[in-house]
Image (cartoon, helix red, strand yellow):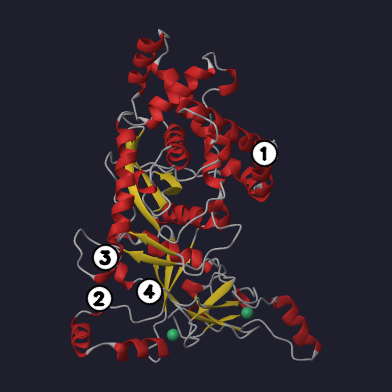
Amino acid sequence: MPNLLQIIMYLIEKIKWQAQLINKLSDYINWLEDDTGRPSKGTDITKLDYKKMTLDDPPNVVEIERLNYKDLLKEAEDVSKPIKKVRRHNSSTAVPESVRCPKCGAPHDYLYKNNGNKGQYLCKVCDARFHEKNRFSKDIQLFCPHCEKHLDKIKERTEFDIYKCRNNLCPYYQQERTNLTDKQKELFETSPYYFKLRYIYRSFHLNLEDIKSYGLIKAPVDLAKIHASPRLLREILTLHVNYGLPAPKVAALLYDLHGVKISRQTVLNYASAAGAQLLPLTQDYPYELSNEICGDETYIRVKGKWNYICYFFDAKKKIILSQRLSAKRNTELAIRAVHDVLSHYALEGVPEDLNLVVDGNPIYKLAQHYLSQHGFQFDVTQVIGLTNEDDVSKEYRPLKQIIERLNRTYKGNYRGTHGFKSQNGARAHIACFTACFNFLRPHQALDNKVPVRIPYVHDGVENMPDKWIRLLNLGNGLLKSTSAE
Ligand SMILES: [Zn+2]
Ligand SMILES: [Zn+2]
């Protein structure tokens, strides 16, 4: 029975993912609320100039050597050169009790004020110098990979800190200055902030393991135990998802066609349960992808507030690869969405020439920075503005238009919902749409074929309602195997 074999193949391919999934179920995203009531502009990182965001090499990371002052004192005694506590002749040289050496932990009795009252201390035990503002112990220090000088933290943002090499003799800085044209040099004299000439490193606060977490969708009803006939369920999905008919219209239509009374809420519950069942399938199906991947954002209402969906899409194969929902349009959303794209290459590896085409939002460059720090290399091409002002925009605009069309298609489907009561409900709706789009909906640009043809779903299956049931069976098998881990 080839159908059963197919299901088993999915299960085997996904064992690794399943383990991760179970681990992460409990700590899925704490959705942050935005209470302005309109689409949030995201965090202030969107104000960053994307042109400045070139991707620099990683810094040199040095683990700070840790010493124990008690050991050092004993060693000194052993060689008959004992270190004594500092003898102070007047109170102005006293070091506050709260200050300890960050390198060896020596208490204030062993510390000198090194430069009067300017705040620098010297440790008599280990010779470390440190400043009172900087006396808290750190595990690592960051150094410029070009000049090996210490990097300064210049900004703290919600999602990352920015470090900069301030060394004027740094070869990176010198080279960048030399590369400026005469005109640019002139501008640099008056407005240096237009340029990024110094080495920059962003240290993200986000944990990759948290980013990877998927989180299942909670089904409001168990499709195996519903009262409606299977025939009704598949008709509901066809009308509500394929045709984007709002729930009240679906209910009315079913009454007119079959004389069956069904509430608007029942329609929504069935569709949500279907979305929950189909999410793992949309995420884990081993798609065959092209190298034309693009991303975009759209917004929807959840509990009366604007939320964002970040989509990634194979523009050639017409396959939706990511469908992340978030209350904020921030770097974390972009990282999650891009990571979804990369995880579709889990089996064969991320192609060397992978290029993601996105809009001018800096969150994608930041996502690239973050993921490159975790070993994922890919290019990002940003198509900026509404007109073809530059060659890059001209070349990639068709891709951008394709994904904007996808967004319009989704919005057409979303409009009838009048927003969602919960993130869970919104995610279920999106998952249903994605499953339909990838597996069931014929696409004009593909000679009216579906983007991903699964023999079990399509072979010998005449109509759309029956295809829905097959797709749900497949989703259910995958979901059950996931939950059973
Ligand atoms: Zn010390
Ligand atoms: Zn440097």
How packed is label 1: few (under 14 Cα within 10 Å), some, or many (20 or more)? Answer: few
Nearer the viewer's eye, disc 1 or disc 2? Answer: 1
Q: Point out which mark residue 194 bears.
A: 2
Q: Point out which mark residue 2 bears.
A: 1
Measure how far apart labels 2 and 4 are at the Cα level. 13 Å
> Which residue is denoted by mark 3 in the rendering?
393
What amino acid type is highlighted by mark number 2? Tyr
Q: Earlier in the sequence, mark 4 or mark 3?
A: 4
Nearer the viewer's eye, disc 4 or disc 1? Answer: 1
Residue sitting nearer the eye, 41 or 442: 442
For mark 1, give the secondary structure: helix
User: How far from the left and from the top, in percent, is residue 58?
Assistant: 50, 76
Measure how far apart labels 4 and 1 are at the Cα level. 50 Å
User: How far from the left and from the top, in percent, is residue 13?
Assistant: 66, 49
Nearer the viewer's eye, disc 1 or disc 3? Answer: 1
Measure how far apart labels 2 and 3 are at the Cα level. 22 Å
Q: Earlier in the sequence, mark 1 or mark 2?
A: 1
What amino acid type is highlighted by mark number 4? Thr
The residue carrying mark 4 has its beta carbon less than 8 Å from ligand 2: no
Query: Which residue is at 53% across, 72% downward?
Result: 135
The relative height of residue 197 versus residue 96 in the rendered view (above or below) is below
